[in-house]
Image (spheres, rainbow, N blue to C red):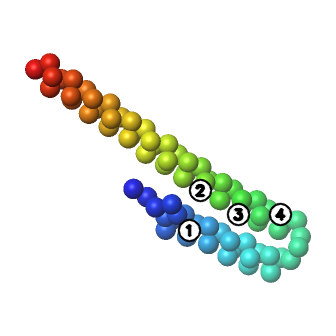
Amino acid sequence: MKTKHDLGNILVIAITFILFAIALFTTGFTKDLLLEAGVLLVSIKIIMMNRAITNSNIEIIRKLNEINEKLKENISKEV
């Protein structure tokens, strides 16, 4: 099972934030800064959505395993 913050997500956030900081110092406070901030927010949102989907998939697999165990119990009782 994945940890709460896996290495890939942390790397993506760190690299995006570093690029955002570089853009801040190279372009200054211009309209391009808003574009860079948007890229940062989109990256973070995608990672948050990935985490939510992972949690949902884990819950679905857990429920499917419960159903599978119950079916196996019922089949063994019938035989």
**Residue at 88% of width from left, 65% of height from top?**
31
Residue that badge 3 annotates = 40
Mark 2 or mark 3: whose residue is earlier in sequence: 3
- Determine which quarter of the picture holds residue 62: top left
Q: Is residue 5 left or right of residue 31?
A: left
Mark 1 or mark 2: whose residue is earlier in sequence: 1
- Residue that lies at the very extreme toward the front in this rendered image: 77
Q: Tell me which amino acid carries mark 3.
A: Leu
- Determine which quarter of the picture holds residue 27: bottom right
**Residue at 56% of width from left, 68% of height from top?**
10
Q: Tell me which amino acid carries mark 1.
A: Ile
Q: Tell me which amino acid carries mark 2.
A: Ile
Q: Where is 2 relative to 29, above or below?
A: above
Residue that badge 2 annotates = 47
Q: Position of residue 61 (x, y in %)?
A: 38, 40
Q: Position of residue 54 (x, y in %)?
A: 49, 49
